[in-house]
Amino acid sequence: MRKQTLIAWAFLTPALILLAAFSFWPVLFGSYLAFTEYNLLDAPRWVGLDNFRDLFADELFWSAMKNSALYLLVVPLIQLPAILAAVLVNNQLPGMRWYRAAFYLPVVTTVSVVGVIWNFMYADTGLLNTLLNWLHVINQPVGWLSDDRIALLSVMFVTIWRGFGWYMVLYLAGLQSIPADIHQAAMLDGASVWQRFRHLTLPLLMPTILLCSLMSMLAALKAFEEIQIMTQGGPFESTYTALYYSYQFGIKSLNFGRALAASLVMSVFCIVLAWLNFRYLQPRESHA
């Protein structure tokens, strides 16, 4: 037994060293820097909780946190259609592979290309305004990215568009892992399509729903690329999220203490939401 344990640790050691160097140490060192004044040029100077006091007194930070919380609306808006789409494309119909590929295409498109495409779509003379004007829905162009009342929703839609295919494929894999004989037995017992979906498919799909909900929630809270390319936090900071706040203070202003304090607060927020996901979405074991 001892020899087997040593062999197991020998195989695990390289991975643990890499995790310690590239995951654990950056997290610990970043957490330490959140309590310091640090600008890359001088050595970190311990300031205690000053960064957090400045952070909580900054209205821009709370505005960014509110936008990040609103961004969580992406989670149900992307998960429910992805489940329904996975159920639809799980059928063996002619050309279904092309449909699956079409849904997945935005996932493999680089974010820079996505930004260019949607900047064109959202432009005053872009496809959306032209189409709505042609249908006589609007009389003047809508400022999809320039109107602070709808700019965040416009960016959130791009996030949904990018991630939809990814979650659909995960749900499709979850559906195809459900044994077909369970559904066949339910059909022989006279269960309707809705009853099979409600009492068989959904419970058996709960591990996938938990995984996808957790991933999409963390992705929503870490939304950055679309904002950086399409709005840079504007207009009037209406798309300024918590991660963009950290980026502005860290990379742009070299105020790494404040940036890492904001990141630490966001990390705690993410951990709490992840715990809630596991608390309420984790499948329960049935006891006969």
Image (cartoon, rainbow, N blue to C red):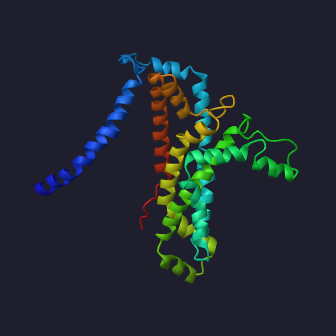
- In the picture, the quarter occupied by the C terminus is bottom left
Question: Which residue is painted at 63% across and 70% down in the image?
Answer: 194
Residue 36 in picture, x, y percent from top left? 40, 19
- Left or right of 101 on screen, residue 28: left
Question: Which residue is painted at 16% across and 55% down in the image?
Answer: 7
In the image, residue 156 above or below residue 84:
above
Residue 28 in picture, x, y percent from top left? 34, 32
Name the one closer to the observer, 238 or 270.
238
Residue 50 visible in the snapshot:
yes
Numbered circles on residues, count: 0
Residue 174 in picture, x, y percent from top left? 49, 65
Residue 79 in picture, x, y percent from top left? 58, 55
Name the one closer to the observer, 91 or 214.
91
- In the picture, the quarter occupied by the N terminus is bottom left
Most extreme residue toward the bottom is 188
- Left or right of 226 on screen, residue 181: left
Name the one closer to the observer, 164 or 47.
164
Question: Which residue is painted at 82% across and 41% down in the image?
Answer: 141
- Left or right of 78 on screen, residue 259: left
In the image, residue 168 above or below residue 229:
below
- Left or right of 56 on screen, residue 37: left
Residue 73 visible in the snapshot:
no
Q: What is the quadrant of residue 286 in the picture?
A: bottom left
Question: Which residue is painted at 25% across and 43% down in the image?
Answer: 17
Name the one closer to the observer, 121 or 245.
121
In the image, residue 32 above or below residue 284:
above
